Image (cartoon, coloured by chain):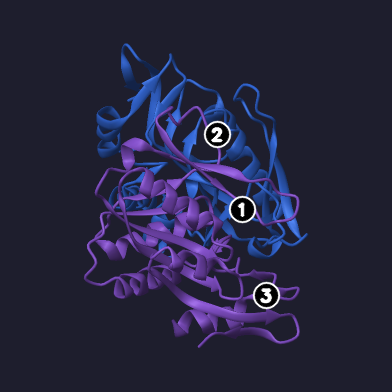
Chain colours: A purple, B blue
Amino acid sequence: MEELKQRILRDGKVRGNNEVLKVDSFLNHQMDVAFLQAIGQEFRERFAHCPIDRILTIEASGIGIACLSALAFDKIPVLFAKKNKTKNIAGDVYISQVESFTQGKRPYNIFVSKEFLRPGERVLLIDDFLANGSALSALIDIVHQAGAEVVGAGIVIEKAFQPGGDLIRSKGVRVESLARIKAMSEETGVVFCD
Amino acid sequence: MEELKQRILRDGKVRGNNEVLKVDSFLNHQMDVAFLQAIGQEFRERFAHCPIDRILTIEASGIGIACLSALAFDKIPVLFAKKNKTKNIAGDVYISQVESFTQGKRPYNIFVSKEFLRPGERVLLIDDFLANGSALSALIDIVHQAGAEVVGAGIVIEKAFQPGGDLIRSKGVRVESLARIKAMSEETGVVFCD
C-alpha cells in the first residue's frame, strides 16, 4: 500500500538496527482515523470475495484498526482478545499463550469469551505489526479451539526480517501485509521488500 | 440515549448487587461497530458547537468507541493513554496514576507521549464506563499537565450509584453519560436514573 509506505517513511522513527519502528503518530498511540479507514478499505480489497463473519484482534493497538476496518466489511462484529483476565470475563473463555520476545518480559495469556466465537465462523485476524508471530499464532490457536476458520490475517506492517511471516504462512494461513519491511536502521531508514 | 438503554436491558448481564454490568457482547469485548458509530453521533450532538481538536481515551475498552466516535467529529485524531510503558514510548511522556478499586489490584500508571498533546488543545475524553472516576481523573490530570483544555467527557455508561460522576463534575468538568444507572442487581436488573 503505497500511501502507507510513504507515511512510514515520513512519520516513522527507527530505533536501533532492525529493532523498533515507532509509528505512534498515526497507528498505535495517536491514531489517524481517516488513514485507518483507508487501511480498512485496502484490507477489504485484498480479501474481496472472501466471506467473513467476524474480525478478531488483540488489545490494545489492534482495536482501533480493527474497528475502522470493520466499516469496510459491512460492519461485521469486532472481537478483541484480552490480555488480562478480569472479573468481567466469565469462566467460559478460550485461552492461548503469547510468547514474548521483549527482553525480561514473560509469556502472557490472552482470552476470548467462548460465546463470541462459534464453530464454522469465518474469521479475519487484524493486527498492527507482525514480527515474531507469537501474538498472531495465539489468535489462530484460539480460532481453531473454537472450531472456527481463519480466512486470513490483515497486517499493517510486517517486519519481514523477523520469522513471523514465514511461520504463519507455513501454517497455511493467508497473510496480507500492507507494508513489508526488509530492513531498517537509524542510518539507512526503512527499506521495503518491494 | 434510549437505544443504548434498550440494548443494556436486552444484552447486559448484571452480576452481584451494584457490582458488575457485563456489556461485552456489544461494547467492550465484542464490539458492534454500527452501534458504536451511533454512540459517536450522540456524543457529537451532545457536544455540538464545542470546538474539539482531539479525543483522548484509555486502553483498551475506550479505543474502539473513541475511534468510531471520531468519525462524527470530522475525523479528529484519537489518542489513547497506555497502561504499560513500553520501549516504543520514548521518555517524553505525561504520567498519571490510576487508583484501582478492584480488590487486590494495585494502582497503575498511564502514559501519553508529550508530542501528541499540546498546550491550548481542546480535548474530549471518552470512555466506556464511569464508576469511581479514577481513570477519568488521571486523564484529566494528563490534559492539565499538557496545558491543554478538557472540553468534557463522553461516557457510555455511568454507574451513578458510585461517586465518580459527582467527583468529576465537582471539578467543573462537563460529563455527558449516555446511560446513567441508578441501581442494579441480579434480581431487579438495571434501573436507570431517568
Residue lying at the far right of the rendered structure = B91
Q: Is residue A11 above or below residue B162?
A: below
Q: Is residue A19 left or right of B102 when viewed as pictured? A: right
Mark 1 and mark 3: Cα distance apart in space: 29 Å
Q: Is residue B76 visible?
A: no
| Chain of the residue on which disc 1 is drawn | B
Task: Please tell me whether mark 1 sits on a helix, a strand or a loop.
Answer: strand
On screen, residue B155 versus residue A97, left or right, reads: left
Q: Residue at x 48, y 46 (%)?
A: B62
Residue A85, image x and y in percent? 53, 34
Residue drawn where x is 61% and y is 65% of the image: A24
Towards the viewer: B40 or A61: A61
How far from the left and from the top, in percent, is residue B60?
52, 46
Q: Nearer the viewer, residue A17 or B188?
A: A17
Marks 2/3: CA–CA distance: 40 Å
Q: Quick check: can you spot residue A188?
A: yes
Counting residues from the N terminus, which is met first, the one under dot 2 or under dot 1? 1
Disc 3 chain ID: A
Amino acid at dot 1: Glu
Element on which disc 2 rests:
helix
Q: Nearer the viewer, mark 1 or mark 3?
A: 3
Badge 2 and badge 3 both on one subunit: no
Density class for disc 3 (Cα within 10 Å; few <14, some 14-19, many ≥20) is some
- Residue A70 rendering spot, x and y as whole percentages: 33, 60
Q: Residue at x 32, y 29 (%)?
A: B12
* Residue picked out by circle 3: A13
Q: Residues within 10 Å of mark 1 (few under 14, many from 20)?
A: some
The residue labelled by disc 1 is B149
At mark 3, the secondary structure is strand
The residue at which mark 2 appears reads as B169
Label 2 chain ID: B
Query: Which residue is depicted at the point 39% across and 73% down?
Result: A38
